Amino acid sequence: MARVKWWITRGLMLGVILVAVYGVQRFDLEVVPADCDSMTPSWPTGGGQIVVDRYYRHARALVRMDILWYEGELDGRRTRLMGRVRAVPGDRLGRRDKILTINGRLTAFPAMQLPEGQVPAGYYLILNENRDSRLPDGRMFGLIPEEQLLGRVITMFPSAGGNLPSR
């Protein structure tokens, strides 16, 4: 009986691994290391691995609050970052008392270098969840062109030293 359970357990594990590998190849998923401090408190702090869907554009349009993996320029070199979509093409950006407004609504983000006006087609405003993060976001880069979007983040696995957020 114990030998049968061993075979069943090993068979199930092999099946899960095969489905995961086939799914990664078939759906263009990628597992990449990421510094997730920019997304606290809603994501674990510290490093970890994120699963990125590179096929996201064919599934549906990007919407506000999607979490994206994108390229930005930092100190003259391209770097990969993670952030949340806050404004999509057609949204209106503004300032009120140095605070960013989106479609006339105040946000909790300082406006900094963001241009005022309508977000043009093919551009997105991507901001860190953690306003105190040392990592740059759209407040420094401005609007991010679609060509710099690498994929939509599906999930995250914290590293051994990562801390889960308190709820």
Image (cartoon, helix red, strand yellow):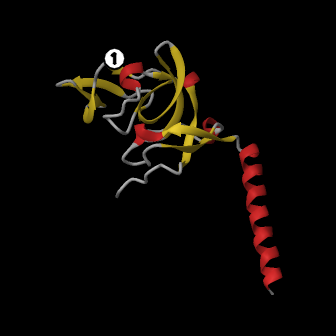
Q: Is residue 142 among what the camera can see?
A: no
Give coordinates of residue 17: x percent, y percent. Answer: 75, 57
Residue drawn where x is 43% and y is 22% of the image: 143
SS class, disc 1: loop
Give coordinates of residue 89: x percent, y percent. Answer: 45, 27
Give coordinates of residue 137: x percent, y percent. Answer: 41, 27
Using the image as rendered, state which of residue 138 and residue 56 is in the foreground.
138
Is 95 located above or below residue 37 in the figure? above
Residue found at the far bottom of this picture: 1
Is 94 located above or below residue 42 in the figure? above
User: Is 126 positioned to the left or the right of 71 in the image?
Assistant: left
Identify the residue position indicated by label 1 in the image: 115
Using the image as rendered, state which of residue 107 and residue 139 is in the foreground.
139
Q: Is residue 69 among what the camera can see?
A: yes
Residue drawn where x is 41% and y is 37% of the image: 38
Residue found at the far front of this picture: 161
Q: Quadrant of the N terminus?
A: bottom right
Give coordinates of residue 112: x percent, y percent. Answer: 29, 21
Image quadrant in which you'd find residue 95: top left
Residue found at the far left of this picture: 97
User: Is 52 positioned to the left or the right of 90 in the image?
Assistant: right
Q: Amino acid at mark 1?
A: Pro
Q: How many marks?
A: 1
Q: Quadrant of the C terminus?
A: bottom left
Q: Residues within 10 Å of mark 1 (few under 14, many from 20)?
A: some
Residue drawn where x is 77% and y is 50% of the image: 22
Using the image as rendered, state which of residue 40 and residue 152 is in the foreground.
40
Image quadrant in which you'd find residue 50: top right
Is 31 located above or below residue 88 in the figure? below
